[in-house]
């Protein structure tokens, strides 16, 4: 492989105009396809195999025209102090709002609180419900402004009016200015690392081109493959992250080869053959982690994972072709200012920061190992108290109308009112459908933890009914989750008394419970598949049994410590105010899956780039301890730079107002911190120091079975020796540097 990539890098350097034009043509072609492609379909939140989804499907089937996923707005009214919501003036203002809201072209219906008896016991709070024919992302600006104008008129009448639901909800967004600061920090880190504006800008440029190609391709294929507008979110983030990393490592190796006296074209070939080989296998580990998301069984996650895997592969192709081509345009500009000024490059010595740290660890491997494991283990302890769920309006800042509406409803109607359980009764097989539904209503109403049950609403055929049960506790409360399980556990006895009817529990609260359980059940199989395949791949790369196992153990330590930190901050509330987290609660159900998948890919990137240099030194004659030091001397600085870049980018998400986005940004940033600076910089060299030659041991029978790939560039020694010294007239003069 190294020889093939070496030739690819030399060819791309020599034929740089053709390579650049090909990528411009690719970008233009997919961009044209994206413009001409039909609009992306609505995002599907389907969760096959769970009870809540089955109930939603039954509702849409038996209640024609009643879209279970249509947008809705719950308008909450609070009377001025000392007044009742039923006062004549207040009632008139509310009725006018409901009448105005019902006039919208996309409105399916608007129900007044006085019609639905949606008034609190003390008559200070009431709510009206506005339902729409389309999903929230299908609402036009005119429909939203129409409702906002009606709300504004009610406020002028003296009422406190807030809007819950998803019709006017602010859509989650990244960190805005904070994210821009993160990218600026990433650029600064690159500039400090390379000492050259060109070397700092080249990885950013190629990564942006890669993201542009992948996102345009996703948009072009969205209609054909059912990819929603949210599918590309993960692809954008990982395409940018991995694209920068891969370009950084090749540019860094190019500078190193130039320091050894190689001509620019030869250095580009060697960099692509050696660092490029590591890029290929690092990219494959990321693809494994992302494609493995299909194990979860959630279509949305599967599409996001495969789209992101495609974006990473495009990043790999760009790193192997466009990066050496651009080096051909600016062969000396990527060198440091001192190198260009002096006319020569001083080859790095043996006593830089990376080698000094490696020698420190090599002298004290056992204390370093124990300290790193103990530290990460202590940070992982909160995982034992992990509670999964989907934070709702209660987790939003108090500056949002959704949060204020949530608080007003909880105060006026009780904490469980914001998370009612929807009960769907299929009485088609019952002798007396109405009697069967009444029996189920009574049984559920008598369950401990249920405050009230609404009157059942039957479909036109009279064989299916829906009603709601209001819990006594908040939607994210552990007691509410237990209530859902209790109702379902009592189902056999309840259904037996109806003689043919059956029921299912759904609604947002039940859906969150089901989603948490589904992802929790899938986490172990996902880990087994991803880690197992990665171990096999790393065995091929490193020709070792223990090094891949060590890599997997280190990853598990870092991801558990990161998840523990997320629990401590967002569930327990430690340092929550520092991050702007106003309300603590359960951890987002998909957070462990996202954390495992994304961090695994980035962790294996650092593992491959760092340990590949150690393996290369070991194969070329260094003893195990010298190989560790050599790997750190050549790779530690650039691995640290890559980690700092990722932390800066991910930290930008912490500046978002949405708690879930804060959670994702914090989790990813802290995971990269633990993995790059504790696992790769302390745990890995300590383990390798203790293992010695055993680290590179592999049984002969396994060595024969596994395919052999020249990742270390052993075959390049001869190629480099016979390469001509004047391989490109355009760079012949500066080749003396």
Image (cartoon, rainbow, N blue to C red):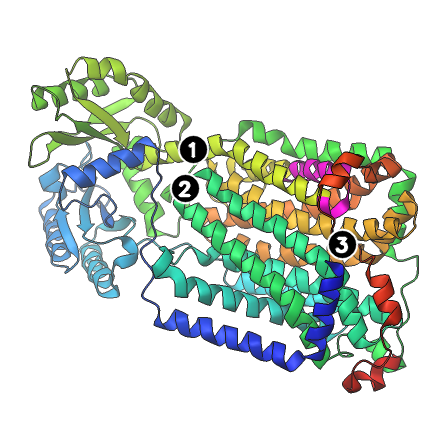
Looking at the image, tell me whether mark 3 or mark 1 is earlier in sequence order.
1
Q: Are discs 1 and 2 less than 8 Å apart at CB? A: yes
Q: For mark 3, give the secondary structure.
A: loop
Drawn side of residue 417 relative to residue 613, left or right: left
Q: Can I make out residue 580 in this image? A: no
723 drawn magenta: no
Looking at the rendered image, the quarter that the C terminus falls into is bottom right
Q: Determine the main secondary structure of the stretch shown in magenta.
A: helix
Q: Residue 624, how many percent across, how many down?
A: 89, 43
What is the CA distance from the residue labelled 3 to the residue labelled 2? 36 Å
288 on left or right of 606:
left
Q: Which residues are magenta?
A: 540-559
Indicate whether 499 appears above or below 133.
Answer: above
Residue identifier under label 1 = 518
Rendered position, 222 above or below 623? below
Residue 25 % position (x, y): 51, 77
* Residue 554, magenta (yes or no): yes
Assess disc 3: are there few (<14), some (14-19) or many (≥20) residues with their C-alpha within 10 Å of its C-alpha: many
Which residue in the protein does label 2 denote?
298
Vertical order, 577 against 277 (above or below): above
Q: Secondary structure at mark 2?
A: loop
Q: Viewed as shown, does residue 133 lie left or right of 325?
A: left
- Which numbered tag is attached to residue 104? none
Between the C-alphas of marks 3 and 1, the distance is 39 Å
Camera sees residue 324: yes
């Amino acid at each position: 492989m190294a020889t093939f990539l070496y030739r690819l890098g030399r060819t791309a350097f020599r034929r740089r105009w053709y390579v650049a034009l090909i990528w411009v043509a690719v970008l233009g072609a997919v961009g044209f396809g994206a413009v001409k492609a039909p609009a992306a379909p609505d995002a599907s939140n389907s969760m096959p195999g769970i009870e809540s989804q089955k109930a939603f499907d039954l509702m849409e089937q038996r209640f024609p025209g009643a879209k279970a996923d249509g947008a809705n707005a719950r308008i909450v009214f609070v009377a001025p102090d000392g007044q009742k919501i039923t006062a004549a003036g207040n009632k008139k203002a509310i009725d006018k709002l409901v009448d105005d809201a019902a006039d919208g072209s996309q409105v399916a219906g608007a129900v007044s609180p006085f019609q639905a008896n949606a008034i609190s016991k003390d008559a200070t709070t009431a709510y009206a419900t506005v339902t729409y024919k389309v999903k929230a992302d299908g609402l036009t600006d005119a429909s939203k402004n129409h409702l906002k104008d009606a709300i504004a008129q009610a406020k002028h009448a003296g009422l406190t009016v807030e809007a819950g639901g998803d019709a006017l909800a602010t859509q989650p967004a990244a960190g805005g200015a904070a994210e821009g600061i993160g990218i600026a920090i990433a650029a600064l880190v690159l500039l400090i690392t390379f000492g050259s504006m060109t070397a700092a800008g080249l990885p950013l440029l190629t990564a942006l081109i890669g993201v542009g190609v992948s996102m345009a391709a996703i948009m072009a294929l969205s209609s054909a493959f059912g990819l929603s507008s949210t599918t590309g979110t993960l692809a954008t983030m990982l395409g940018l992250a991995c694209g920068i990393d891969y370009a950084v490592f090749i540019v860094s190796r190019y500078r190193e080869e130039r320091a050894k006296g190689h001509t620019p074209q030869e250095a580009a070939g060697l960099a692509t053959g050696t660092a490029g080989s590591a890029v290929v296998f690092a990219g494959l580990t990321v693809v494994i982690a992302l494609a493995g998301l299909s194990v979860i069984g959630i279509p949305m996650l599967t599409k996001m994972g495969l789209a992101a895997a495609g974006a990473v592969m495009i990043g790999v192709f760009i790193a192997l072709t466009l990066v050496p081509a651009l080096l051909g345009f600016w062969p000396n500009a990527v060198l440091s200012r001192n190198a260009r000024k002096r006319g020569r490059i001083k080859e790095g010595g043996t006593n830089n920061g990376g080698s000094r740290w490696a020698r420190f660890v090599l002298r004290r491997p056992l204390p370093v190992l124990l300290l790193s494991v103990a530290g990460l283990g202590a940070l992982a302890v909160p995982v034992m108290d992990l509670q999964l769920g989907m934070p709702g309006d209660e987790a939003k800042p108090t500056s949002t109308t959704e949060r204020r509406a949530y608080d007003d409803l909880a105060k006026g109607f009780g904490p469980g009112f914001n998370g009612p359980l929807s009960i769907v009764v299929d009485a088609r097989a019952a002798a007396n459908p109405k009697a069967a539904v009444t029996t189920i209503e009574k049984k559920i109403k008598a369950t401990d933890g249920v405050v009230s049950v609404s009157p059942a609403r039957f479909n036109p055929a009279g064989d299916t009914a829906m009603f709601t049960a209001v819990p006594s506790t908040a939607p994210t409360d552990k007691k509410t989750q237990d209530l859902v399980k209790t109702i379902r556990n009592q189902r056999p006895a309840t259904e037996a008394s109806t003689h043919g009817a059956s029921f299912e529990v759904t609604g947002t609260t039940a859906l969150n419970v089901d989603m948490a359980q589904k992802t929790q059940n899938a986490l172990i199989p996902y880990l087994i598949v991803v880690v197992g395949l990665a171990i096999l791949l790393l065995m091929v790369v490193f020709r070792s049994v223990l090094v891949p196992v060590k890599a997997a153990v280190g990853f598990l330590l870092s991801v558990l410590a990161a998840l523990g930190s997320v629990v401590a901050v967002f569930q327990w509330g430690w340092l929550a105010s520092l991050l702007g987290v106003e309300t603590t609660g359960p951890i987002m159900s998909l957070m462990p899956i996202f954390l495992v998948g994304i961090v695994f890919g980035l962790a294996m990137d650092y593992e491959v780039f760092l340990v590949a240099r150690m393996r290369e030194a070991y194969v070329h004659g260094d003893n195990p301890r010298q190989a560790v030091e050599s790997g750190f001397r050549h790779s530690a600085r650039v691995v640290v730079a890559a980690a700092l870049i990722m932390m800066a980018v991910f930290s930008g998400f912490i500046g978002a107002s949405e708690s879930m986005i804060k959670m994702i940004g914090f989790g990813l940033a802290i995971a990269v911190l633990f993995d790059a600076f504790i696992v790769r910089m302390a745990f890995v060299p300590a383990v390798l120091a203790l293992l010695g030659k055993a680290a590179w041991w592999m049984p002969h029978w396994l060595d024969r079975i596994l395919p052999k790939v020249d990742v270390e560039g052993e075959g390049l020694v001869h190629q480099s020796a016979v390469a001509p010294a004047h391989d490109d007239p355009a760079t012949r003069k500066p080749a003396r540097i």
